[in-house]
């Protein structure tokens, strides 16, 4: 984990070590400046060129060190023009500058700016080199890119600039050389104090010779306390066997870029975790180690928190799907999985609200957490589904006994918002079969068993059986085939006409079909659940929309105008604001007029649409798209709620239409629905019309449009094209 910027911290350590050697050994000024320029390009974020210039008589500038000819040319231009950021710093107008984008500096340096851009300079930063008596010059950093420098760049630039100032100051005259040697250690100390990380100089006996201010703050010790302290004393007791700068202490740990992770003990007894890096140095034959300490305690705690959040459910504190992945991957033949789904949980959400539902889930989680289930790990997968992984099945009494016990634990009465709610759970249990299978397969088997338990009624238990395992394997294979069919456009669209009272087609509903190579023609009843299970439902909805619109663009016009195309959207798709936004782009590319598109959505998807979803729906409506509620009367909505939602039509479910010939209650329901729909200015469509009697009754009840086998079965696109070309009312095909 690197915490010192985008450039590698060990490069900074090596640069500081080089500076120490220069100061302690009094290397040549030119070599020192050349090294500073090289380090600037190597360790300063964003820097790809650097140079040091000094003042001469008459405020003339001279380049002493440069990483490229571009720097020398830039310095020469600024000296010649008497303007520019480097010149301003060198003459003392500024102590530091940062120019994020030279294209925005035209007013400040009208002559230098264009010349700099010709040299390919995007951004610059510079530092005044000065002593108490004199301005010596400037260290200038260049980048070809605008906005290249950051706070870390400035911190490291200050360190390099301070070192350049020391080097230039010490070489002002030969008479000052002796004094420079004597005060080199102090200068080095001053330089280290500019470093943003803890830095210590350790001798060959692992004792601290010098420590900067950042290291003193990090450890809580004063300078005098640190001076002479051994690395062993600085470390946490559990790590004191190695020391810090000893050979074993310097051995690379597991950290990135060769850094060691060490734990120090502060003066107040608190541990602090650091990444530690080393760079060698020497003075008069003695070995020293420059050691950089980067405090990563907070970052590690944050990483642990993020890991906890990523692997645990925020509501219950239980492991989530990601948190139990490893356990599933390590599942053996002795591992059992139980999938528990709270029965009728949706009723709690619908009647008491989602906050009450969350309270219920939290109480269920607490009940499972405190249950004595030996060798079991409890997780919350999603919504009202809980997962239990058991690795000590024999101790738990076997799979049947464990599943029954869990079902009993979840059969409980919960006080909730002033109500006492009786709940139960359907439990599906599975073990790995004899043939090779994965933990993910085990979860699928338990899921299949859980749905089988649900079909038996609330609170039931079902163990996965061989037939279920076969079904799951076949389902997985079918999901793979569907993904391939989507990729290769192997699906087809059939269209069932919607007619007016004169039996003239006014719209068609797009229905997906799939000619499977082994199973024959598959209907939406097979395709949609498979897509849902495989996570392909939105891809399928996109394919249907794209294909239906492309085909609708070529349909012949019929009186009184082109027929509409009705497309069903899955609940998840209908509630996805991003998908609805993308749909508008698909519609535009197709060339189909927006008023010809009707999107069918279910009542469930309209229960609590988000603000973003409402806005996306309204944007499509403003363009001319219409929304219709499909299978009205089978969900949890009402016409009173529909008046506040952006829908233009409702389709009465076929179960009400089937009984209107003989059931007066069904007729009353249809009549009420039509009257209320018309009162809130919504059109009413009847689906599932199969007899002439039903058709005439529906006309009398005021239905606006009709769909069913009486008029036409779903047709492939070619047959629909031929039907629309006839431009005649559809014949009545009386069902036998």
Image (cartoon, rainbow, N blue to C red):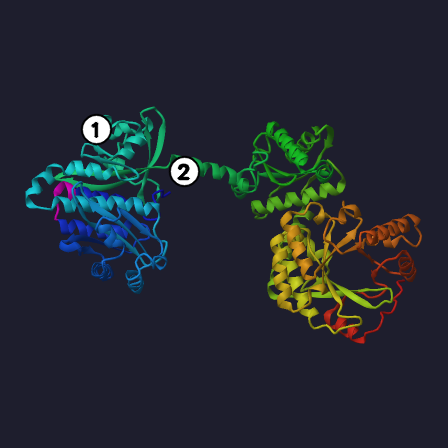
Is residue 650 inside the magenta stretch?
no
- Helix, strand or loop for disc 2: helix
Task: Please say if 371 is above or below 260.
Answer: above
Circle 2 crowding by C-alpha within 10 Å: few under 14, some 14–19, many from 20:
few
**Residue at 35% from the left image edge and 41% from the top image edge:** 254
Q: Is residue 433 visible?
A: no
> x, y percentage for residue 240?
29, 28
> x, y percentage for residue 321?
57, 42
Q: Is residue 77 visible?
A: yes
Give the residues drawn in magenta, as a range: 22-28
Looking at this view, name the residue that lies furthest to the top. 268
The residue nearer to you, when weighing 255 against 234, is 234
Task: Please say if 263 is above or below 450.
Answer: above
- Helix, strand or loop for disc 1: loop
Q: Quadrant of residue 731?
A: bottom right
- The residue that disc 2 covers is 299
> x, y percentage for residue 181?
10, 39
Whole-number angstrom distance, CA of label 2 to CA of label 1? 29 Å
User: Would residue 150 appear left or right of 463 to someone viewing this image?
Assistant: left
- The residue that disc 1 covers is 227
> x, y percentage for residue 67?
22, 57
Among the two numbered marks 2 and 1 on one chain, the one whose residue lies closer to the N terminus: 1
- Residue 68 disc label: none
Q: Quadrant of the N terminus?
A: top left
């Amino acid at each position: 984990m690197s915490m010192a910027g985008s450039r590698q911290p060990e490069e900074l350590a090596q640069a500081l070590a080089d500076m120490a050697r220069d100061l302690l050994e009094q290397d040549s000024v030119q070599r020192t400046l050349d090294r500073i320029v090289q380090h600037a390009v190597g360790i300063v974020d964003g820097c790809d060129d650097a140079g040091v210039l000094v003042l001469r008589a008459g405020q003339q500038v001279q380049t002493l060190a440069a990483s490229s000819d571009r720097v020398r040319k830039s310095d020469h231009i600024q000296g010649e023009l008497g303007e520019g950021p480097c010149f301003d710093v060198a003459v003392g107008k500024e102590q530091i500058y940062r120019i994020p984008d030279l294209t925005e500096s035209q007013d400040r340096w009208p002559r230098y700016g264009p010349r700099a851009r010709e040299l390919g300079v995007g951004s610059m930063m510079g530092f005044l080199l000065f002593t108490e008596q004199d301005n010596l010059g400037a260290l200038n950093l260049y980048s070809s890119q605008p906005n290249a420098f950051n706070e870390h760049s400035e911190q490291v630039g200050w360190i390099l600039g301070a070192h350049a100032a020391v080097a230039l100051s010490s070489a002002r005259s030969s008479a000052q050389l002796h004094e420079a040697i004597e005060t080199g250690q102090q200068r080095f100390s001053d330089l280290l104090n500019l470093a943003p990380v803890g830095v210590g100089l350790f001798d060959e006996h692992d004792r601290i010779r010098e420590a900067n201010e950042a290291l003193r703050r990090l450890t809580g010790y004063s300078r005098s306390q640190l001076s002479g302290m051994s690395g062993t004393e600085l470390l946490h007791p559990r790590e004191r066997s190695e020391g810090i700068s000893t050979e074993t202490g310097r051995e690379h740990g597991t950290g990135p870029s060769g850094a060691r992770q060490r734990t120090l003990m502060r003066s107040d007894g608190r541990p602090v975790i650091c990444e530690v890096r080393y760079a060698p140095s020497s003075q008069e034959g003695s070995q020293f180690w420059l050691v950089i300490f980067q405090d990563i305690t907070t970052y590690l705690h944050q990483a642990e928190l993020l890991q906890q959040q990523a692997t645990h459910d925020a509501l219950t504190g239980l492991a989530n799907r990601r948190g139990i992945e490893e356990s599933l991957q390590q599942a053996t033949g002795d591992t059992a999985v139980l999938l528990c789904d709270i029965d009728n949980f949706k009723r709690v959400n619908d009647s008491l609200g989602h906050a009450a539902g969350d309270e219920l889930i939290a109480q269920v989680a607490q009940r499972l957490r405190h249950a004595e289930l030996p060798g079991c790990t409890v997780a919350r997968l999603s919504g009202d589904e809980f997962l239990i992984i058991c690795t000590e099945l024999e101790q738990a009494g076997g799979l049947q006994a464990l599943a029954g016990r869990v079902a009993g634990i979840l059969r409980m009465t919960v006080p909730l918002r002033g109500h006492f709610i009786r709940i139960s759970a359907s439990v599906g249990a599975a073990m790995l079969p004899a043939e090779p299978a994965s933990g993910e397969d085990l979860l699928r088997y338990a899921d299949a068993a859980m749905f089988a338990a649900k079909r038996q009624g609330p609170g039931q238990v079902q163990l996965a059986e061989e037939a279920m395992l076969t079904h799951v394997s076949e389902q997985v294979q079918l999901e793979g085939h569907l993904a391939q069919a989507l990729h290769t456009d192997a699906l087809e669209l059939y269209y069932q006409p919607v007619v007016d009272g004169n039996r003239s087609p006014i719209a068609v509903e797009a229905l997906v079909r799939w000619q499977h190579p082994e199973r024959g023609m598959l209907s939406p009843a097979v395709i949609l659940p498979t897509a849902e299970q495989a996570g392909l439902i939105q891809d399928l909805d996109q394919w249907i929309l794209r294909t239906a619109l492309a085909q609708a663009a070529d349909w012949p016009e019929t009186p009184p105008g082109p027929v509409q195309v009705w497309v069903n959207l899955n609940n998840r798709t209908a509630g996805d604001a991003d998908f609805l936004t993308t749909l508008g782009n698909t519609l535009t590319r197709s060339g189909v007029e927006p008023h010809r598109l009707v999107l069918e959505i279910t009542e469930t998807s309209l229960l609590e649409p988000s603000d973003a979803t409402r806005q996306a729906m309204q944007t499509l409506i403003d363009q001319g798209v219409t929304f219709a509620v499909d299978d009205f009367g089978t969900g949890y909505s009402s016409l009173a709620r529909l008046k506040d939602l952006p829908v233009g039509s409702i389709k009465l479910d076929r179960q009400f239409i089937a009984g209107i010939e003989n059931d007066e209650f069904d007729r009353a329901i249809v009549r009420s629905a039509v009257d209320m729909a018309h009162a809130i200015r919504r059109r009413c469509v009847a689906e599932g019309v199969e007899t002439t009697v039903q058709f005439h009754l529906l006309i009398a009840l005021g239905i606006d449009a009709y769909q069913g086998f009486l008029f036409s079965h779903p047709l492939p696109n070619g047959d629909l094209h031929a039907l629309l070309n006839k431009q005649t009312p559809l014949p009545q095909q009386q069902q036998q």
